[in-house]
Image (cartoon, helix red, strand yellow):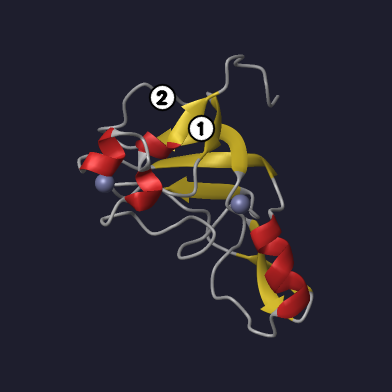
Amino acid sequence: MKAAIFQGNKRYLIVEKETPRVTRPEEAVIQVKACAICGSDIDPYFLSPEARGYVSGHEPAGIVTEIGDSVKDLAIGDSVVANAIVGCGRCEFCQKGIDSFCKNRYPTIGFEIDGGFAEYLKVPHYRAIFRFPSESYLR
Ligand SMILES: [Zn+2]
Ligand SMILES: [Zn+2]
């Protein structure tokens, strides 16, 4: 698949990467149809000379193409949006829905692991994936 990796100094490189596959039961892979460009992508684009070793993009939407064995309430073909921040799901913060305060978060999509500026994206836990109200939203 094709993916965009920031090279520093206002430069992205389109690279060929292996398409991610589900390797753990709670994971899902989505075919990215859109990925917003956030202020936190724009600042380093203009200001940072440092290349990144992972694919950027943390506000992705797409179609579910693969799900792990323990994934609930999600099916292949669903139109979804994914949250970059995925909490443990068990601590007091996650129970209140404020995963960003979780001390045992999964690596953050687009910052610590590959993000959505790519044809496919692996999401580390299905808790971070939300279905659009209409199944045809992204088609
Ligand atoms: Zn953002
Ligand atoms: Zn938590």
Kind of residue sitting beneath label 2:
Leu
Crowdedness of circle 1 by 10 Å Cα count: few (<14), some, many (20+)? Answer: many
Residue 44 picture location, percent across and down: 69, 72
Query: In this rendering, is residue 139 above or below 45?
Result: above
Residue 98 makes an appearance in the image: yes
- Asked if marks 2 and 1 touch (Cβ < 8 Å), the reply is yes
Residue 91 picture location, percent across and down: 21, 43
Residue 35 picture location, percent across and down: 67, 46
Front one among 67 and 51: 51
Q: Is label 2's Cβ within 8 Å of ligand 2?
A: no
Q: At 53% from the left edge and 60% from the top edge, which residue is drawn?
A: 18
Q: Check disc 1 and report the residue beneath it.
A: 64
User: Residue 58 vs residue 103: left or right?
Assistant: right
Query: In this rendering, is residue 48 above or below 83?
Result: below
Q: Check disc 2 and report the residue beneath it.
A: 74
Front one among 127 and 121: 127
Crowdedness of circle 2 by 10 Å Cα count: few (<14), some, many (20+)? Answer: some
Dot 1: what SS?
A: strand
Query: In this rendering, is residue 130 above or below 23?
Result: above
